[in-house]
Amino acid sequence: MGNNWKTYRLADIASIKTGPFGSLLHEKDYKDFGTPIITVEHLSEQGIVHKNLPLISEEDKNRLKSYILKEGDIVFSRVGSVDRSSIISSKENGWLFSGRLLRVRPNSHIVDSEFLNQYFHQSFFKHNMRSLAVGGTMPSLNTQILASIYVKLPSLKEQKEIATILSTWNKIIEKTENLIKAKNIFYISLVKKFINEANILSKYFVNDLFNLGRGRVISKNYIENNPGSYPVYSSQSQNNGELGRIKTYDFDGKYITWTTDGANAGTVFYRNGKFNCTNVCGIAKLKVNNKIDLRYIAIYLQTITKNYVSYVGNPKLMNNIFGSIPLPLPAYNYQNKVANVIFTLKEEIIILEKLKSSLVKQKQGLMQKLLTGEWQVNLDQEFKEWVV
């Protein structure tokens, strides 16, 4: 750490305030129009999420004027996920914060708001927040706990330089996220268009065309002890459903798999090659070498399988129900055309998701180096080319 870094209590570099709760603000005060109130659900590392915000009238805003937020404020979750925080941008200037939040207003003569925001997002700081929280089933913070936390700061100039570098990464990550969202919206609309415009030539049920099976129990411990190149697919939907890789495989060829149990029940994938599946994966293999594009089947099934999931207790889509799903099929040429377009788009989304993951890891590495003083910042030299 550089020689110019100093340790401060948060109370010495910022004012801290608890949001309005109790008799000050009730859900009955929420209106159809007015000033937004930020709650725990709206906090993210990329900033405030502008979705499903409660609103209050101008009259209530005046009554709660001491809880009005300013650009550069940082709001913390007071109850539950106490390591969650977000900085207030110009877009949220003048909004209010709920009683489930704590507001930190940095002293701009000592600390840069964006630097402090990034500092709060370090893994060690988040761990510290969780360990300091009081209560068992519902951990909570208060102004005294937050005020007592120590932070280490370089000069204000260096803080601003570090914040600029990390903000650049944030902007790139945000742009990538927005592109992924746009691609996914286009993906969904394109699938609906192709399915709706399909000229159906034959109708089957899944059982008519496929032999259905299940994967086997493959634990994380087993994967760790048997590393290899063959993917193990599980109930998750992220990373194409891949849980890890081992040195053997159970299946080889073209298959459709689906998640049978859990939150992602009904999620469908097309598989091609050597792979494994856990016991919460269903396996569908064509009975005969019909002129059918399995990619199209996977695309179509993904649009309707959620309608067949049982949500009594743990969500499930068992083999017998999956086998009863109708399969209206257009001509093979149409199936192939749709599959080529959709899978090309899906590959673009996968590439963007990998790029985002790489950018997030790069940023985490930078945070570790820059926010601890392990790397010294000199904008005129090593970091200048990174800043836009």
Image: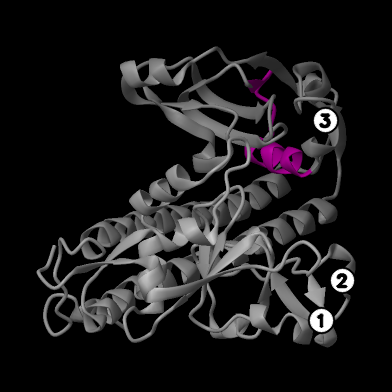
Say if the magenta span includes residue 260: no
Q: Which amino acid does label 1 sit on?
A: Asp
Look at the picture and state if 85 lies above or below 297.
below
* Colour pattern: one colour
Q: Residue 160: in sight, yes or no?
A: yes
Q: Is residue 263 left or right of residue 11?
A: right
Residue bounds of the magenta highlight: 281-303
For label 2, the SS is helix
Mark 2 touching mark 3, by CB under 8 A?
no
Residue at 86%, 44% in the rendered image = 200
Q: What residue type is labelled 2?
A: Asp
Residue at 84%, 54% in the rendered image = 196
Q: In this view, does 213 lie to the left or right of 144?
A: right
Residue at 46%, 60% in the rendered image = 146
Indicate the quadrant where residue 122 lies.
Answer: bottom left
Along the polypeptide, which appears first: circle 2 or circle 1? 2
Q: Residue 226: in sight, yes or no?
A: no
For residue 29, which numbered disc appears in the image?
A: 2
Classify the position of the N terminus by image quarter: bottom left
Label 2, residues with CA under 10 Å away: few <14, some 14-19, many ≥20: few
Q: How many numbered circles does the render carry?
A: 3
Question: Which residue carries the number 1 mark?
Answer: 60
Look at the picture and state if 55 lies above or below 183.
below
Say if the magenta span includes residue 285: yes
> CA–CA distance between discs 2 and 1?
8 Å
Question: Which residue carries the number 3 mark?
Answer: 311
- Report the front residue among 219 and 298: 219
Q: Which label sits in the foreground, 3 or 1?
A: 1
- Report the front residue among 239 and 289: 239
Residue at 40%, 15% in the rendered image = 222
Residue 251 x %, y %: 50, 18
